[in-house]
Structures are given as C-alpha cells and as structure tokens.
Image (cartoon, helix red, strand yellow):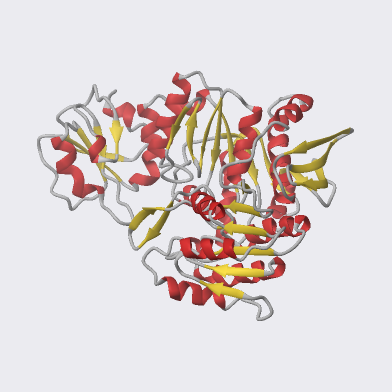
Amino acid sequence: MSIQKLFKNVDYRVLTLVEEDNFKDMSYNSKEIKEGDIFVALIGNVADGHNYIPSAIENGAKMIIAERDDYPYPKDITVVLVKNLRDNLGYISSNFYNFPQNKLKIIAVTGTNGKTTTTYILESIFKNSARIGTTGYRILDVEYEAKNTTPESLDLIKLMKEAVDKNVEYFLMEVSSHALCQGRVKMLEFDSAIFTNLTQDHLDFHETLEKYFEAKASIINHLKPNARLIINKDDKYCNRLLNVSDSFSLKEVATINGEVLEYTLKGMKVRISKDDKKYIFTTKLMGEYNLQNLLGAILSAYNLGIDLDEIINSIQNINSIAGRFEIIDNDKDVMVVVDYAHTADGLENILKTLSIMKKNRLVTLFGAGGDRDKTKRAKMAQAACKYSDLIFLTSDNPRTEDPEMILNDVEKGMNSSIPYFKICDREMAIKNSIQTLQKNDILLIAGKGHEDYQIIGREKIHFDDREMAKKYLGGR
C-alpha cells in the first residue's frame, strides 16, 4: 500500500522516505512488531510510544508513524508524522486494512450500566456475530482477553477484519465514554445504537455528570443516515434524546414496553408489548434493569429487520452472564450472588431486586476502586443502606490509594442504623460475610463480577470473588 493511500484523508508529513510500499502489518506494541511491519508510536497516559521506536526497529519495523517533532528519528527508515495521532489512528487503520467496518452490521451499546448484558442478549439473537466488551472479545468461537471495554481504534479495526475474514455478519460492541472521547470509534458508523442509562461514574475523567452525558450522547453522531438511536425512556438523561430516538420503558408509553410479572429463584416472568403484540415468557435474567436491557436489544434487532417472534424465541434461552447476578451453588440454605455492580445506581438496582426475593436478611459486601471517582464512594454506601440488613465494606482494586482511606470515604455515606464491618482484606471480608449468614439469608458480593484479579499498587494479583465464595461456602 502506498503512502498516499495509507494516509488518505489524514493530515500527515513524510519526514524520511526509505520504503513506501509492501508493509505487512501494523501495531502500537513494539513487542508485536515483525519484519516489514509499521510501528505506531502512540503517546499514552503512562508510556510514550516514541521511547519504544528502537525496539520496534530491532524487531523489523519498516515504517514509524509518530507525532513528536522533537524526537531524534533515525534516517534509515520511513518516518511519517501525524498530528493528533490517536485521533487519526482509526482512519489510518481503516485505510491499511481496507475498511472492514463497511462489510459488517455494527450494533453499539453505551451507558453506565447494562452494556455487557445487552451485548450478550444481542448475541443470542444474532448467531453469526462477534462481540466486543468488558468481559472479553469473541469472534465466533475464538475468545480474546479484553484490554479495554472498547479497544484502541487499531485493535478494533483488526478485530473487524478478522470478523470479515470469517464471514461474520453482525458486530456487537460496547462503546465506553472514554472511547467516544478519545476517538477510538471516530471511523465507525453504526447500524443501531442503544443508550442504556446514565448515572454517576468516571467523573475522575469527565469531571462533571453533564460532560459525561455529552460524551455518551455523542454516539448519535456515529449513526448511519437511516439508523435509529434507542434510549431508556425511564432514565432522565437518556430522555433528553427522546425526540431523536426510539425508546423502551417499564413506566410510560414507549416504542416497546415491558413489565416484570413474577420473580423466582430461577429467573423472572415478564410481559413485553410492541404495537399490538404481547409476549409473556420466563428468562433466567433477573431484575427490572435486566428487563430494560432485554427491551433495548429486542428493539435494536427489530429495527434491523428481525421478526419479533424470532427475537422472543431467541432471547428466552439466554443463560446467566458471568459475574452478572451470578448465583453461587451451595447446599447451605443461603443465596450468594456475585455481581459487577460498582456504581451507586448499579448497587441499588440489584439490591432492589434481591430485597423482593429475600426471606430473611440481605447482606451486602462491596468496596470502591482506588484512583477513580472519589465522589461516588459515599453514594454507594447510601445505596447499599437502602436495602441491606448488614454490610461489609472492603477493598475493590485500591490501586495506588491507601485502602483504609478509600473505606473512610465510603463510610461517610453509611446510615448509623445499619450494622456494618470494615475489613480491608477482601478475602477475609468474604470469609466473614459467609460465616455470618443465617438460614435463608442472601449475600451480595458486589463490585468485581467476572474479574479474576485485584489491583494493589500497580500489581495485578489473581483474585476471583466466585472462587472465594465457593471456598468459604464449602467450609461453612
């Protein structure tokens, strides 16, 4: 591919020209570079890709795409400078890999909570699909570990190329607010987009809730001309986009409506209404928030031409999702649930559902992430206090912060009438919470869900809430 084609529609400057064609592959990771590849020197929050140029050249790079004017680039290799490189990387990647996104039907899901579950529901409808999100990336039967909820634009285009090469038709992706702000999806147009909800999170990055909303709402700018945004009419922020969207609701008249009729230990019975059609069925998913996720996915598939009867038949068979209302099997006459809920709204939603199901006490274990939005910590405690009979405060990826200081922030939101324990060691907190359980109690272990690690300092240590719950339920 020529330099002109590679940088089409991008503002670039050729610093040195040694080779200008026959490049093999492209990466921003110098360790992945092979003979004949292009190395992209991205500037990140922690590392500067320019520092890895010598390593990339040693591994066989034949071109460097970079940004800095002040770097001493070697003279014996092609070097091209691009202003705002991260912002333009999606276009460069698209040019290099021949626009695989144009050969896929792309469904995007954004929102604070519900993105992962919604993409799994969509996956049950669209069998010939790839799924990209928090729990991992999957293309047909091949799974990849997720680096981010939404990959870097270069990785995203590579995944799309692989999907096209495998004749995948639908590309289902979670789109984070960070991805929207950082240009990771700038080169994409969506066939459908779902905005699940918006509650406080990531204010360490966005600063205000309004800026967070603006980032999420910008997904509408990525829709194809005839595509529709689908919003949660029950969410006050999503509702601001009602005039330009289709909608779902459990409370008001919308494009599609739903109602929970009954909860059981195996799921819930729901009613769904669309135009003059009504469906009553049982799903293994639990909670009104999951019914909202179902409605968004159903409407998206319907807008893309899938028959409503076919959609309903498909979603009835969806299994529970790893780390999302995941019930830990045991023979102790107690219910233990592991869930990813890590915001005040997420906690409140699942606790509200569990409170309807409880026969005795509802015990909640949670923490708050370090080096992240500090203003949500006390609010999480307030949410937990609304429904819990006993609370365990513990660590949840403290990172470089003092775990005790994080829990002190959380503790400020505690209600004095609710008994609680503060145990920084998460394993000990899980052990103690299980040992306190009485017959017919429910224990919610919240915050990590599918994650199998704990980040302490800058080190990622293996830790899985589900493994710990099974360990101490077995010895109870």
Does 42 sit left or right of 320 as displayed? left
Farthest residue in the right direction?
A: 276
What residue is drawn where x is 74% and y is 48%? 243
What residue is drawn where x is 63% and y is 34%? 122
Whether 79 is drawn above or below 429: the answer is above
How far across and down, in percent of the image, does residue 439 sit?
70, 59
Where is residue 410, by image quadrant? bottom right
How far across and down, in percent of the image, does residue 7 sit?
33, 33
Quarter of the image containing the N terminus? top left
How far across and down, in percent of the image, does residue 53 sit?
18, 43
In the image, 273 versus 409, the foreground residue is 409
In the image, 381 versus 91, the foreground residue is 381
How far across and down, in percent of the image, does residue 354 sit?
72, 56
Does 118 sit left or right of 28 as displayed? right
Q: Is residue 473 visible?
A: yes
What residue is drawn where x is 10% and y is 35%? 76
Quarter of the image containing the C terminus? bottom right
Does 459 sit left or right of 131 as displayed? left
In the image, 15 versus 310, the foreground residue is 310
Whether 175 is drawn above or below 36: the answer is below
Farthest residue in the bottom direction?
A: 416
In the image, 400 versus 159, the foreground residue is 400
Q: How many marks?
A: 0
Q: Is residue 99 visible?
A: no
What residue is drawn where x is 58% and y is 63%? 435
